[in-house]
Each structure stands twice: as structure tokens, then as C-alpha cells.
Amino acid sequence: MHIDIITVLPELIQSNFEHSILKRAQQKGLVSVNLVGLRNYAVSKHKNVDDYCYGGGAGMVMMIEPIANCINDLRSKRKYDEIIYMTPDGETLNQKMANTFSSAQNLMVLCGHYKGIDERIRELFITKEISIGDYVLSGGELAASVFCDSVIRLIPGVLNDETSALTDSFQDDLLSPPVYTRPANYMGHQVPDVLLSGHAGEIEKWRMEQAISRTKQRRPDLMAKFQGGENN
């Protein structure tokens, strides 16, 4: 997979791809991430990428020309499965969406800034708009990092134990069950006996029961989806 991330502040996002799982994914050659500095495509000598909003009002707007120039340049080099804009009014990112994107070959991600981008960019170029939640950030870089992390870890071969991703929360519309490690007894707080039994069938049954119980308690909205899936 190849991901181009268009940003006004590449340094704000760079470190997220230089550590842990995302770093190893790149070292294995399973994904390549290219941070594209938008100011390199500015049309003014001062490298401006924003201007005042037509009609007045507070906040600056990212200009159409630098973004269009950047997107067109990138599209001249490869074909993209999706051109994504990270925005609070986009479709909320979820595990199902991450699973779908994990099979893509080429993705382009545009990070918003200031008051937003010129609407014509959304009309002419963007194929998918994604939000990571109902709140506003100072820029789209953190949102782009969240999106990329959620997708890259699902690419086959990225995780050392590929079954790990299959038991993540939301994969089957359930929250994950509780997990434990050594010591088995911490100040009187015991690990459940079933996890020490070595009985794979009983352990799996316990985990499913715990996942269902936790989802009922914490996310009844997910429980309704899970039960609907069971009935299909």
C-alpha cells in the first residue's frame, strides 16, 4: 500500500510513522507513507496556502490552487483508490471502514487546516470524507494519523500475530473481553481460573461471554448491531 498525505505541517505528523507498528510496516515494505508539503505547490512567492473567506467571517480558508496543483501532480504519478479529506462533517471512521481501506493499493489523504478548504476542492477532487469524531481539531494531521494507524495495522503481515487484529474491539460489533498477564495473583486480585485452565474451548466461551457482557453494559448501540447480525 502507498499513502500520500497532503499537509501544511509535515513535521506535525512525521513522528507518528517513525515508531512501533507503523515503522515496522514500512521497514517490511508492506506500506510506504509519503508526506507532501502543501506549500511546495503554492502559487505566490510567499508560499501562502490560505486566504480570507468570501462573504466575510472569522478564520482563513485553504486556497483551491495549491491543493489542486498538488493533487494533480500526485495523480499524474499513480492511480488512487480514494482521495480522502479528513473533516469533522465526514463519515465517522469505524472498524468496518478500516477493514475496507486495508485492501487498497493507493490512498491520498488531505489534511484540512484553518477554517477548512475551498468547497470546490471537495466537489472536484475528493472521493471520500472521513471524521474521527464529533469534535474539532486544530488541523487534520492528527486525524490522518488515526486513520492511517487504524488501516495499516490491518494489512496482512504488519502485526507479528495476525490473529491479534481479528480479536480487536469492533471487529464483530463487540467490545474486546478483559485481558490479563503475569502475575496470576496481585495482592489478592486473581486472574479468572478459566484462563489458567488450558482448556481452549472454555476459554473461548468465557471470552465471548465477557465480550457480550461488556458490550451490553458500555455500548448497547453496538449490542443491537451484533444481535442484528446474529439474526441474519
Image (tube, rainbow, N blue to C red):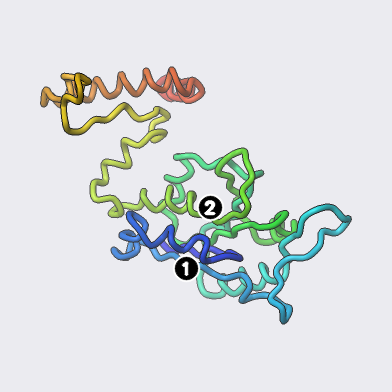
Counting residues from the N terminus, which is met first, the one under dot 2 or under dot 1?
1
Pinpoint residue 21: horizontal percent, then vertical percent. 33, 54
- 187 or 61: nearer the eye? 187
Pinpoint residue 93: horizontal percent, then vertical percent. 53, 42
Query: Is 30 placed left or right of 7 in the picture?
Result: left
Q: Secondary structure at mark 2?
A: helix
Amino acid of disc 1 = Asn
- 97 or 35: nearer the eye? 35
Give the number of the mark in front: 2 or 1.
2
Pinpoint residue 177: horizontal percent, then vertical percent. 32, 27
Residue drawn at x 23%, y 46% is 161
Asked if marks 2 and 1 touch (Cβ < 8 Å), the reply is no
| Disc ID at residue 34 | 1
Q: Which residue does the numbered mark 2 point to in the structure image? A: 142
Residue drawn at x 59%, y 52% is 86
Pick the quarter of the image with the N terminus. bottom left
**Alpha carbon distance from label 2 to label 1:** 16 Å
- Disc 1 packing (10 Å; few <14; some 14–19; many ≥20): few
Q: Is residue 56 above or below residue 14?
A: above
- Disc 2 packing (10 Å; few <14; some 14–19; many ≥20): some
Q: Secondary structure at mark 1?
A: strand
Q: Is residue 230 above or below residue 58?
A: above
Amino acid of disc 2 = Leu
Residue drawn at x 37%, y 20% is 212
Q: Is residue 221 above or below residue 104?
A: above
